[in-house]
Amino acid sequence: MVDEREQRLRIAAARADFLEYGSAGAAGVTETVAASWQRSQSAGVNSDNYQVEYHNDIDFDSRLVRCARPVIERLTVDMADVPVTIALTDACARIVDRRDCSNAVGTLLDRVDFLPGYSFEERGVGTNGIGTVFESGAPISVVGPEHFNDALVQFACTGAPILDPVTGKIEGVLDVSLLAESWSPLLHALVKSAALDIGRNLLLDRSQAQQALFEMYVKADSRPRQAVMAIGDAVIMNQRAQKLFTPDEQFTIHEHARFLMTRRDRILESIPLASGRTVQIRATRILCGEAVAGMILLLDSEAGAASHGTVWADEHALPIIDAPDPRTTVIATELRHPRPPIVESRCPAWENACDSIAAALGRRDNLLVIGESGTGKFTLVAELFHRLHPSGRSVAVDAEQVTRQGDLGAVDTTTSTLLIVRNIDRLSTYGVDVLNGFFDTLDLDAKGTIVAATLSDASLDSDLPFHDVLENFDHSVTVPAIRYRSVDLPQLVSRVLQEIAPDRRIRISPEAMRVIGAYSWPRNMTQLRDALHSALLKRPVGEIQADDLPGYCRSTSARVLNALEVSERDTIIKALRDCGGNRVHTAEKLGMARSSLYRKLKLYGVTEI
């Protein structure tokens, strides 16, 4: 058995050779340490100049800290007579908790800034039991001269990654540090076990819905050679799915699954991918009580070229909407600057909706188009109709008009006409009778009228009067909201800017586009248009910056805020911007406790500034 002291001397000699001759001198050390030395040197770490970066913008009461606290306290009690210091870091290798079982060791570690707030990334201080764990992704012990920097050679440190069982990401590192001559291999197993306990606490800390989704994912993943994804608050996928699909394809599947999650409990569907492949999705929605926990996807790549929707020969950019009666609404006639067509898309859910609507219009089915307010249901139906029937006419009426007028106006049913009844969920009982009477008068054998109606999906689970008119429709299609179409956002932004500022030279900065992409847009195109209009009031020409967008674009809150909350959220966002995103300085500027600021940021869903 090799004497430990002799082994450390050999490593010290190898370290000296490495520092003088490079990688060829690292003979006799483990591959992990040699690779770390090489990374440290490549990062420009100076072996004899010790500097540790301090961060004052750290959450010392995070979910990780809360979940680790009981494990660290137990470990501190168990090692009360052992000369060690126990430390916990966040996902950026910054110390967020430290417990000393020995004042002597603690004093020595103070001298090398092994303190809360300091970062021990490998690229900053070289090989160590925290930063090297992040680089290797595995538990590691760095003893004595295995450290790259001279200031740390007197210590030994054993670190283990803390993995989130759901996402598989490293949330932090648990480290035990002591003097090199006191180190024992037993610490390796002890620290690794404690890190696993913290990981289990992270799982238990999640909601019951997240646990239910994770349990179902584990069951689905037991199938041999099956690509599996779980979509919820986080995205989990097995190695088969990661190898089978590129990151862009994974994102497309993820986004489409979020749309599917709003529709049915079980779905079998094939969607095209940008690469030309098609993926078959067998999806099951997971419920926890009445709440939707997420969706489990079984994925199979299908051979052959993917169908990307109907190819249209006609290139009308804007539907021609006719108004044969003065009481009907004229939606559009001629525009000096025609808008880009709404049909073009790279979103599978939108492509499927376009194909289904076009097929129904081609069969002359009476069509129900469902979706959130502002998704473009009306414009999409009208545009697809005029691509199929360039000489046809479109008549649009609102549900309120039907109730107020008592009829649908003079609709010519002998020519190719599309009657669009908007927002039928707003029909009164009288309006339902009027619309049902109109259906009774239609000559279904003639070439004449197709009836299309738009409906908010939020109204489906209600007892509103419109349910009595649904029997007149042959087909229904659900149109996805903007938040399921992030791949189309640049095109949508360009379209809106062309509408509201057609003659101006307007661009969107990458940072502004990132903010737009991160927001959920609960009012869809209507809200996107409002946000860009607001930005143009601040910057009428040139490149729109992130700060030009309204404050709510920095929020991901799912609930509707009242006026006071909106004012508070916008004040916090402005203060964050003024302080360059530094939360400590922001809390001081606002005169609130740092913990209160963190709670407010979470409450309002404010994303990183």
Image: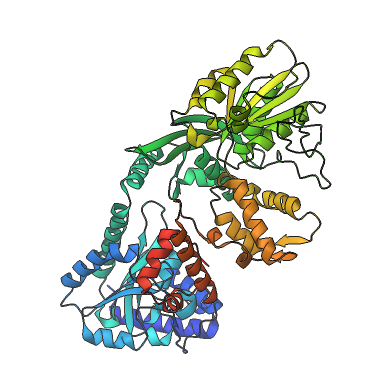
Residue at image location 67% in from the left, 38% down from the top: 276
Q: Which residue is drawn at 81% across and 44% down?
A: 335
Residue 71 screen position, x and y as percent? 23, 64
The residue that appears at 79% across and 61% down in the rendered structure is 505
* 123 left or right of 103 in image: right
Q: Position of residue 169 (x, y in %)?
A: 42, 58
Q: Where is residue 606 in the image (x, y as percent from the top left)?
A: 48, 62
* Residue 343, image x, y percentages: 70, 38
Quadrant where the image shows the N terminus: bottom left
Q: Which residue is drawn at 27% across and 82% down?
A: 181
Residue 303: in sight, yes or no?
no
In the displayed structure, 437 sits above or below 603; it is: above
Residue 398, quarter of picture: top right
Q: Is residue 455 visible?
A: yes
Which residue is at the front of the view, 485 or 104?
485
- The one of 104 and 420 positioned closer to us in this rendering: 420
86 left or right, relative to 284: left
State whether residue 129 is above or below residue 522: below
